[in-house]
Image: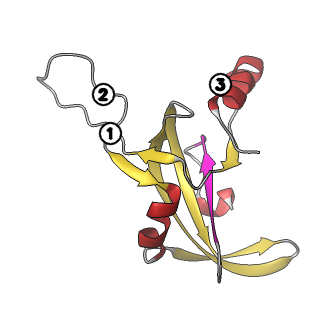
Amino acid sequence: MFGNNRLFKLLRDTLGPRAHLLSRLRTNAVLYGLSVHTPGVSGRPHKYGARLGNAAQLAAPRQEYAQSYTLKLYGRTRTVSAVDQLVILKTLRCQVRVVWIFRKTQWLPLVIIDLTLTVAQVI
């Protein structure tokens, strides 16, 4: 199941601000950059920054910046490459961290609301 605002809103209404969401991100989910507030400009600042593209379009360029992590996964020590980026999702209406995990022949995007976790903790 993919995380969306309907699920996240239900969690927040039930558990309050201590609820955090860690979910797989749809590959066609559109990601937006963080909004930049320019002082001296009248009006409400933008909620969303520039459109970056979807998760699949951003995976290939990010792979060259991926760092290797040696982690205990599924009972074995495995090496995975991963890279993260702070973005805004319109489906969740908040700032999130997207972590792209690269294996030999496949990749997986994860989205997390808790911005304090490291990439290794997310994996």
Q: Is residue 108 magenta?
A: yes
The residue positioned 59% from the left and 61% from the top of the image is: 119
Do residues under tags 2 and 1 come within 8 Å of each other at their CB atoms? yes
Residue closest to the eye, 68 or 54: 54
Quarter of the image for residue 10 reads top right
User: What's the magenta bit mostly, secondary-structure-wise?
Assistant: strand
Describe the element under mark 3 as helix, strand or loop: helix
Identify the mark at residue 49; answer none if there is no mark.
Answer: 1
> Label 1: how many residues lie within 10 Å, few (<14), some (14-19) or many (20+)?
some
Which amino acid type corresponds to the residue marked 1 in the rendered image? Gly
- Which residue matches tag 2? 46
Label 3 to label 1, Cα distance in Å?
25 Å
- Which residue matches tag 3? 17
Residue 89 placement (x, y as % from top left): 50, 39
> Label 3: how many residues lie within 10 Å, few (<14), some (14-19) or many (20+)?
few
Magenta highlight range? 107-114
Label 2 to label 1, Cα distance in Å?
7 Å
The residue positioned 13% from the left and 23% from the top of the image is: 41
Which is more N-terminal, label 1 or label 3? 3
Name the side, left or right, on which 33 lies relative to 12: left
In the rendered view of the protein, which quadrant contains the N terminus?
top right
The residue positioned 67% from the left and 23% from the top of the image is: 9
